[in-house]
Image: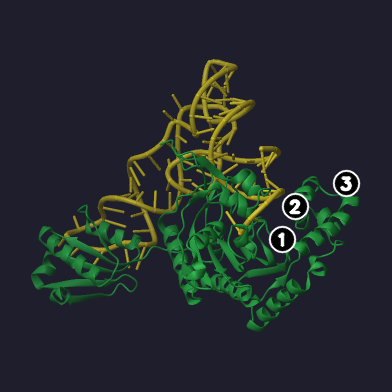
Amino acid sequence: MNITAPKGTKDITGIDAKLWQNMENILRTVSNSYNFSEIRTPIFEDTSLFVRSIGEVTDIVEKEMYTFESKGGESLTLRPEGTASIVRSYLQHNMLRQSPINKLYYLGPMFRYERPQAGRQRQFHQFGVEAIGSTSPIMDVEVITLARDIFFALGLTDIDIRINSIGSVACRDKYRKALLDKIRPNLNKYCKSCNDRINRNVFRVLDCKNPECSQMNKDLPTIEAYLGEEPSKHFATVQNLLNARGVKFTMDPTIVRGFDYYSNTVFEVKHHALGAQDAIGGGGRYDKLISDLGGSQTGAVGFAIGLERCIIALKASQKEMSAQLDAFVVTLGETARAESLQLVDRLRKQNKDVDFDTEGKSMKAQMRMANRLGAQKVYILGDDEIAKGIVIEKNMQTSEQLELKLADFAK
RNA sequence: GUGCCUGUAGCUCAGCGGUAGAGCCCUCGGUUGUGAUCCGAGUGGUCGUGGGUUCAAAUCCCAUCAGGCACCCCA
């Protein structure tokens, strides 16, 4: 066997698959409780959708997209993130006419051609929500609270929610100028990548991990002073309501986010178990994206969660999960075989997860198998039991055995 | 795309010039039909791949692929 999964991709099997299912169930349940409903969009889209939404000079668009030409000659791209598709779908189906506010969630694989490392793959999975149709700071709060509740429900209580506001385009233009004026004179003291960043996206200098850069960054102005009246008020309301609602957060002026479409509130959720890629989720408001993509001026706010990263955090904080099965049916002798299959069917009809041996193994082997599969109960059915019209039910935790009437299962 | 580290049984790893080992897992036993514990036995690897050096290579050298970590970027 010399074909392996492509670089940066993973097979999810066995116990891990169970863990994923549990996680997905929780994501759906909590989102439903906030009245968000699911949207499923294609895994590939027209390339221009991502170029226009994420931004031409972002790393994702410049070098990380899986772009290919279809047989018809169109340029298609495997989605690198979820928001663009949701907005496309929103506009295409004119969802505004169905409801002034659309609260949607999605769940699925995303693709970015990057060098894999801890918490980063080429095919990875995101869960995300988008609330489209509101500019109210209350919706920001609703979305951030939903994010928190999801992590709490998953069992990840040890999270750090960091928020910031990057204001409107006008605020950012002013702030950008101010930053450039301050940084340019000291440019030779900044690291190589910051020198590069200053031309591409100055704001990235703010979250540079180089200790010398971050030391100098302490003297730089924060965006707060450059926020206009509206953005400033908006952000203050978000903070007040979060506090009133008991959502813990920290202010972090270094949060700038990578996509061009963000404005006003931005936030990231960090978890310490992750290593360098410690952002387990992130999002913010994107009031310009919908009009950029041809819609009318529409407020929107959302976030995305990296599911692989959740799994890493979950595994770090939780004990190993073990296999689980409701029942295992042990059979001895040829006459009991047919009867045992009926017993299996009846147990399954009671909505139980049931398995049994198909290979004619010894009783000892069947018991071992039951144990390995994590069976709660074992039903033993041999020729002796058939003769007496009973079945033995063994509790695998307590080792207690009961004799049950076989006829009672026939209902 | 850059740097550092690592590739030996399903898993975790030892061996570091003389043609492969441990533990776990798995399978089967430990007298008629009872698991997880205990005891015993067994299956399983062209030592990532391709070249080279050598009488001899898992072991040294080169290349390549893959993985890990970090940078970059991001979920």
Residue type beneath disc 2: Asn
Q: Position of residue A177 (x, y in %)?
A: 84, 57
User: Taking the image as drawn, is residue A115 in sight?
Assistant: no
Asked if badges 2 and 3 are on one and the same chain, I answer yes
x 11%, y 68%: residue: A386
Chain letter of the residue beneath label 3 in the structure image: A
* Quarter of the rendering occupied by the N terminus of chain A: top left
Residue furthest to the bottom? A244
Q: Quadrant of residue A306?
A: bottom right
* Any part of residue A322 in sight: yes
**Rendered shade, chain B:** yellow
Neighbourhood count class around disc 1 (C-alpha, 10 Å): few under 14, some 14–19, many 20 upward:
many
* Quadrant in the rendering for residue A223: bottom right
Q: Earlier in the sequence, mark 1 or mark 2?
A: 2
The residue carrying mark 2 is: A201
Indicate the chain on which mark 1 is placed: A
Check residue A308 in the rendering and tell me which mark sits there, or answer none.
Answer: none
Measure how far apart labels 1 and 2 are at the Cα level: 10 Å
Q: Are marks 1 and 2 on the same chain?
A: yes
Mark 1 vs 3: CB contact within 8 A? no
The chain letter under disc 2 is: A
Q: Which chain did the image draw in green?
A: A
Q: Quadrant of the C terminus of chain A?
A: bottom left
Q: Amino acid at mark 3?
A: Asn
Q: Position of residue A34 (x, y in %)?
A: 51, 76
Residue, disc 3:
A188
